[in-house]
Amino acid sequence: MARRQSGFVCQACGAVAAKWNGRCDSCGEWNTLVEEQAVAPGPARNARKGRAFVLSPLDGTAGEAPRTGTGIGELDRVTGGGLVTGSALLVGGDPGIGKSTLLIQAAAVVAQAGGRVVYVSGEEAVGQVQMRARRLGLAQAGVELGAETSVEDILATLEAAAPPRLFIIDSIQTMWTDAIESAPGTVAQVRASAQALIRYAKSSGAAVVLVGHVTKDGQIAGPRVVEHMVDAVLYFEGDPGHQFRILRAVKNRFGPTDEIGVFEMTGAGLQEIANPSALFLGEREQGSPGTAVFAGMEGTRPILVEVQALVAPSPLGTPRRAVVGWDSNRLAMVLAVLEARCGLKFGGLDIYLNIAGGLRISEPAADLAAAAAIVSSLSGAALPADRVYFGEIGLSGAVRKVAHMAARLREADKLGFASAVCPGAGEAAAGAARPALKMLNVSALGDLVASIAAGGIEAATG
Ligand code: TYD
Ligand code: MG
């Protein structure tokens, strides 16, 4: 017979320990071990002999998975063309970032197209969700709404009628199931609840969307275990001080993971941004030193953003290096290369680097734009406002070519830029697909520094 046994489960990583500890041995987090009851897999009374099942070849007849378009283009782009029937999707993000708003908007579109949509909120009362829907003008969409946290009650309600095309659980951390004795929000509860809901989705063909909160260090709070159980994980991120919101896929069994969706939070809900470059460059202050436009790529889409740098004398013994929207290790590397290969000195100077608009960039191709912005700020010489930069900087000071050059140049041309500084510019200008922009080749970082500094840099570096 199954034996009840208790263990201490880390709420951050899900590791199980026999004894309570202040620190999880597995992930090193403090104060995360909580006692949970688990059913030990002891010898079952009615143990049965296994039954053989049929194995299939890889080249089956199953076609593309059928999808439900959400009617929100940016959401469809990130999921790879809509929600796959019978699949589970996890949407994570900081509290207040707009997860509930995005999902109620998607729910309304699917319902308007004739699908049955059930939205279960474990956090807000029915009245609150109704009020938001009314404010967004979606009250008539025909979404069925519930405020419930018991998984058994939710499943009984869903099974009482035809399976919905889409059902949304907001949020998985508030759900609990009778099968487990732990408190709601614990790893065991979240795991068991998610399992039951996903099982229903797979068997009924409904697509389920689970909302998950994210902790301050960027993990989906507690139950990272859920990430392994679902078919796709999307993060909704953005700076609360900016109105831009980025939806990013970090896992997707049915599509690419490098696409992003861009939204703007307005008084009337989330608006899609079809042309993010124009938005990110919208409030650009031209003619001031320390800014460079980076021609970047997010998935298959080129996005132009402004990289801003401020280099200023530091009152501190150890100067500050602060980065928003980029990797601080890459900043350290770019600074080291500028010092070691180009003779610049940053000792005693604070350096701040910011990606305008709240976008987060992870591409190494941004190295060159970051370097250009830093050198521009250091020298006090403004860069031409109609110029874009891209290229990866190596430790030797060489600038390396990056992928998708043509797409980056096309986007820059479309937005009215006149010139591009990048490695391999000579070949591109001479090639068959001649870019419309003026191409300025740079193969060593020293060349870039020299050209920017033609004015005041010698004085600045002493
Ligand atoms: P919400 O969707 O509740 O966030 P989450 O579910 O991720 O916690 O969004 C809450 C924020 O969005 C709140 O601060 C108000 C803002 N908001 C708008 O600016 N406009 C709107 O139309 C709506 C519905 C919300
Ligand atoms: Mg919410």
Image (tube, rainbow, N blue to C red):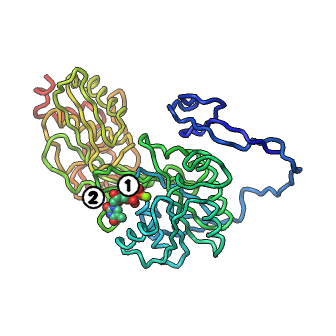
- Label 1 CB, ligand 1: below 8 Å? yes
Q: Which mark is residue 97?
A: 1
Pinpoint residue 457: horizontal percent, then vertical percent. 14, 30
Please tell me whether residue 286 is drawn above or below residue 333 in the rendered image.
below
| SS type, badge 1 | loop
Whether residue 103 sits left or right of residue 280 in the image: it is: right
Pinpoint residue 263: horizontal percent, then vertical percent. 35, 60
Discs 1/2, front: 1
Please tell me whether residue 377 is drawn above or below residue 316 in the rendered image.
below
Ligand 2, by image quadrant, is bottom left
Q: Which mark is residue 307?
A: none
Please tell me whether residue 454 is drawn above or below residue 240 in the rendered image.
above
Instruction: Tell me the amino acid under the disc marked 2.
Output: Leu
Instruction: Tell me the amino acid under the disc marked 1.
Output: Ile
| SS type, badge 2 | helix
Q: Residue at x 22, y 54 (%)?
A: 417
Q: Look at mark 2 in the image and give the residue it sits on.
A: 279
Quarter of the image holding residue 224?
Answer: top right
Q: Residue at x 52, y 79 (%)?
A: 114
Cα separation, mark 1 vs mark 2, equals 19 Å
Pinpoint residue 20: horizontal percent, then vertical percent. 60, 30
Pinpoint residue 59: horizontal percent, then vertical percent. 71, 59
Indicate the quadrant containing the C terminus: top left, top right, bottom left or bottom right. Answer: top left
Question: How many numbered tags mark residues here?
Answer: 2
